Image (tube, rainbow, N blue to C red):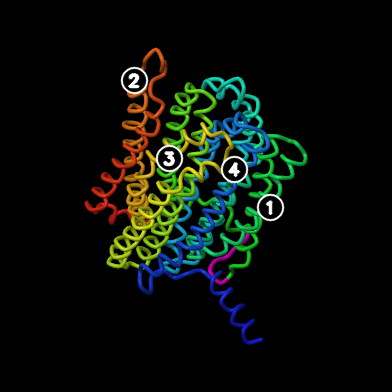
Amino acid sequence: MIKLNRISGAFRRMNTPMDMTEGTPWRRIVAFTLPMLIGNIAQQLYSTVDSIVVGHYIGDNALAAVGSAMPIVNLLLVLFIGISAGANIMVSQYFGAKNRESLSYTIGNCITVTAICCIFLMLVGTPVIRPILVLLNTPVSILSDCTYYLVISVVGIAGMAFYNILSSIIRGMGDSFSALWYLLVATVLNIGLDIFFVAVADMGVAGVALATVIAQFVSSILCIIKLSKMSEQFDFGKSFMRPIGSYVKTLVRLGLPSGLTQAIFSSAMIVVQSLTNCFGEQFIAANVVVMRVDGFAMMPNFSFGTAMTTYAGQNVGAKKMDRVILGAKQGTLLAVGISAVITGIILLFGRPLMGIFTDTKALVDLSYRLMCLLAVGYIAVAVTQSLSGVMRGAGDTMTPMWISLITTVALRVPIAYTISYLTRTPELPYGLNLCIQISLLISWVAGALLTTAFYLRGKWKNKII
């Protein structure tokens, strides 16, 4: 009985909001990051399982169709990425300042704004999907499957949107465990539905999209239930969901740069996808495999970035700037060390990893070659994500946006097309296909250098809400 009580007590503590304004900074950051990293890995399993099931049960062309759809899905999600970023900053700062009223109105207004955006995207996004795919030179052989995947994803976008925003709110209060439990439940459900819809019901690519939508709806409902039970931290009810101008404006001011950053990145991905499509179905499929492994490799970086935003936000709210600086240094060093280890693993064991997604040897070889080129860039991304997270947590969301604009629009896209143009030959009418990965690596390194420079400059300290 005593052991059961201890386990129960430990479980309750894990699911309780964490005050990151006290304790050793790196310990708090690791304690917050670890469950979130597991959760992000689980979330990445959504798309990874999709790719494995599609690649083995349907074929390489279907795998290419899912890959071609993802940049457009990411672009449609930029509104919610912006809301999520703004919510995390506001919630963490108000939680750190112990401002219950502002915290309550922030959470309620986030839910209302998210619902409005979901309705807007469902009405506007669905009719333009196929024309966009045609405009992007999507091969005819994968056009129909790509369209089915996107239509289902857009119709069910509320599940994706609400999970991301609500889990961001919960994390802003220092609770990274609850979102993990809910995501693990959804991941298991997604895997089961993937296999059933594709292998048993023979629904093809549409079944993969439907499985993901259903699983994400489940995770968002679990987040709502969790928030409704957090009465010790804030008030949850209809009266706080009524839009309040000041809160909506702050949410937009803080979230818009992050949303625009993702919009810029997603738009660049779509432009680059148009170039990628020129290299044929096998290269498209190889990029899908690379993106899936890349997604896992990037998880520690994204997790540390989010953790640093919450850490910085709570400590800025508590007016402990010295603690913010110390945590930024320790968190960045941790992120860099982990990324270095991941890079080594990819270089040593990358080929077997690629083989998980396809049985085609030529596709495995091409995917591994592309992956090796990108691997060393993960260390640079670790620096960018960690320091950008600190700046965002303090309320400076503009600087990371401008850095993303420069590295993506001014560097990545032009470099990719320039290399493609300069390397054209009769045998390679569209040039060297490695131009996609080379341009991405250069943009990552440039982003790390610019982010470090602006962080050291220190103007982000003056952006507190």
Q: Main secondary structure of the magenta part?
A: loop
Q: Which residue is mark 2?
A: 423
Residue 116: assigned label: 4
Q: Is residue 35 above or below residue 254?
A: below
Residue 238 spot, x, y in % from top left: 63, 57
Q: Which residue is mark 1?
A: 189
- For label 1, the crowd category at 10 Å Cα-Cα, with few meaning under 14, some 14 to 19 and many 20 or more, is some
Residue at the image point whose x is 60% and y is 78% from the top:
7
Q: CA distance from mark 1 to mark 2?
A: 46 Å
Disc 4 marks a residue whose amino acid type is: Ile
For the record, the magenta segment spans 232-237
Q: CA distance from mark 4 to mark 1?
A: 27 Å
Dot 3 lies on which element? Answer: helix
Q: Is residue 382 left or right of residue 155?
A: left
Residue 41: assigned label: none
Question: In this rendering, which labeled residue sits more in front, label 2 or label 4?
Answer: 2
Disc 3 marks a residue whose amino acid type is: Met
**Cβ–Cβ below 8 Å for labels 2 and 3?**
no
**Which residue is outermost to the front?**
361
**Which residue is outermost to the bottom?**
2
Residue 137 spot, x, y in % from top left: 52, 20
> In this view of the protein, which residue sits in the foreground, 345 or 311?
345
Q: Which residue is mark 3?
A: 371
Q: Is residue 124 left or right of residue 204?
A: left
**Which of disc 1 and disc 3 is earlier in sequence?**
1
